[in-house]
Amino acid sequence: MKSEMIFSGIGGQGTILMGKLVCTAAAAKGMNVTLAPAYGQEKRGGRASCQVVLSKEIGSPVISEADTILVMDEESFKDYEKKVKAGGTLIINSSMISLTTARTDINVVEMPFTEIATNLGSARSSNMVALGAVVKTLDIVTLEDVKEVLRKKMKPQLVDVNLKALEAGYNFTK
């Protein structure tokens, strides 16, 4: 059992936080986890991404093709669209990305993260909407696993809106 993911976006969108939450949930279930963040010197506005590997076995943390890739902006789409494994899932932030893929060998989920989060009361929770969409693709961690981590790791005043955002992304249907 192994799952490889890439989260990519602009610094400040919470891409690395999403990776940390998934890793924490998987580690709590006894899985081996690897989180490899990459970001520029800027705190906000620069490129940010992370590669996540969840596995029963200890293996390489380097991902050449991922099962699930989440792209939060157009540059990330351009960089990572081709790195989704055949049969994998590309999750696209349609709030910021107007590009479409020509690939027919992958599952594509287009979701307006910002609009969904704004309707729930906080545009800043768009990353939790995105994380909900990612969790839906996973067999290793469940929505409840990630909710439990959120309750423990987030400031109490942020928990409710982020739980709602996580659920909205998980339950999204077009």
Image (spheres, rainbow, N blue to C red):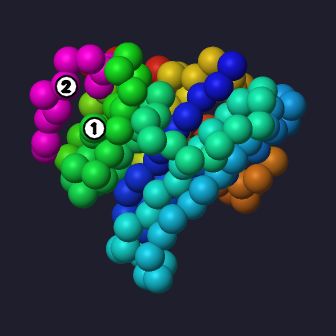
Main secondary structure along the magenta-highlighted residues: loop
Residue 95: give x, y in percent of width and height. 25, 46
Residue 146: give x, y in percent of width and height. 69, 35
Q: Which residue lies at the image location 58% right of the left edge and 23% below the top edge?
A: 138
Task: Name the mark on residue 2.
Answer: none
Q: Is the residue marked by circle 2 packed among few (<14), some (14-19), or many (20+) residues within 10 Å?
A: few
Residue 102 left/right relative to 83: left
Residue 8: give x, y in percent of width and height. 41, 53
Could you say which quadrant of the image residue 69 lies in?
top left
Residue 156: give x, y in percent of width and height. 74, 54
Q: Quadrant of the N terminus?
A: top right
Residue 134 left/right relative to 107: right
Residue bearing the label numbered 1: 82
Between 133 and 103, the one lying in front of the other is 103
Residue bearing the label numbered 2: 103
Between 66 and 110, the one lying in front of the other is 66
Between 5 and 134, the one lying in front of the other is 5
Q: Secondary structure at mark 1?
A: helix
Q: Which residue lies at the image location 37% right of the left edge and 73% below the top edge?
A: 46
Q: Earlier in the sequence, mark 2 or mark 1?
A: 1
- Amino acid type at circle 1 is Lys
Q: Which residue lies at the image location 34% right of the left edge and 50% below the top edge?
A: 72
Could you say which quadrant of the image residue 101 lies in?
top left
Magenta span includes 158: no
Q: Which residues are magenta?
A: 98-108
The span from disc 2 to disc 1 (Cα, nearest Å) is 8 Å
Instruction: Specify whether residue 160 is in view.
Output: no
Residue 31 left/right relative to 109: right
Residue with the most extreme bottom position: 41
Q: Secondary structure at mark 2?
A: loop
Q: Quadrant of the C terminus?
A: top left
